[in-house]
Image (cartoon, grey):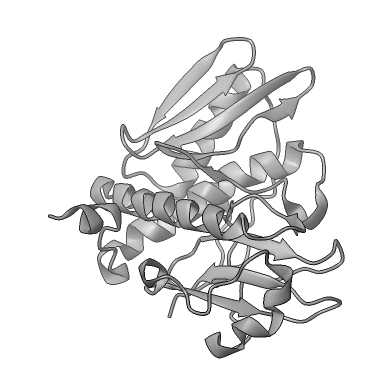
Amino acid sequence: MNGASNSWPALPFAEWKDTAMTLHMWTQIVGKIRLTLSPWTNHSWHVTLYVTSRGLTTSPIPHGTRTFEIRFDFIDHQLRILTSDGKSQIIELKPRSVAEFYRIVMKTLEELNLPVTINMMPNEIENPILFDQDQEHRSYDREYANRFWRVLVQSDRVFKEFRSWFCGKCSPVHFFWDSKKRRSSQMLRSTNRSCASSFCHTTPCAPLKSRMKFCWILRRAPTTLPQTWASGTALHWRKRSQPCICLSNIRN
């Protein structure tokens, strides 16, 4: 396998659909923990997860005078919960129902004196099942979970490069766990804005040929996307109160 193929591994949805759906619910549980405990930030930037060199993380979450962090590790296949006072717990990532995962995570937080109550209804999916009742989604394929993370690592790298061109208000590269996108279930995105009142959603809004119409908000803008971005990404815009440019994954 060459370096490029290894960096961007194949991820045919049909082969990892069950794992994808289970991971979507697991990341929603973890994301809602951050949502519940974190102070509100504009554009819901306080609810997202972030790509790491081993998986995904919440970043530090406040809980009273302490903080804690929840990390998905897709190399050793563990969920790690670490606290600011030196405590930690590890939960193995393996085939288990969403209901079991939910119970174990909540019990572990209780044991670490980090009680939290979240809304147990999944967001933005068809026919949602309460987390504590979901016995349907229970798949976890280590190989495809790792491939998924490796794709996120490369997407994160590309998005950060794209984001660096913009000289106005700009979000970090976020992993939004509530995405409406079909197939992928999750969305990694970075949004550039010409002002605070402008918000660009992740739905494709215009043909690629329209991308240069608003290139004035970039410090520099290529006439075409780099060849390495040709697969699975597109530059698009959406006009609301102000124009903006967003680079988003495109899932069919």
Q: Nearer the viewer, residue 191 or 15?
A: 191
- Determine the image quadrant of residue 118: top right
Say which residue appears at 53% left-offset and 79% top-offset: 223
Q: Nearer the viewer, residue 35 or 55?
A: 55
Say which residue appears at 58% left-offset and 32% top-offset: 106
Q: Nearer the viewer, residue 163 or 197?
A: 163
Q: Relative to 244, is 236 on the left or the right?
A: left
Residue 199 place in picture, x, y as percent: 77, 68
Residue 120 place in picture, x, y as percent: 64, 50
- Determine the image quadrant of residue 110: top right
- Where is 125 relative to 167, above or below? below
- Determine the image quadrant of residue 115: top right
Say which residue appears at 63% left-offset and 24% top-offset: 68
Q: Where, quadrant-wise, is the N terminus in this rendering?
A: bottom left
Q: Where, quadrant-wise, is the C terminus in this rendering?
A: bottom left
Residue 127 place in picture, x, y as percent: 55, 71
Residue 167 place in picture, x, y as percent: 73, 58
Does residue 122 appear in the picture of this structure? no
Q: How many marks?
A: 0
Say which residue appears at 68% left-offset and 48% top-offset: 47
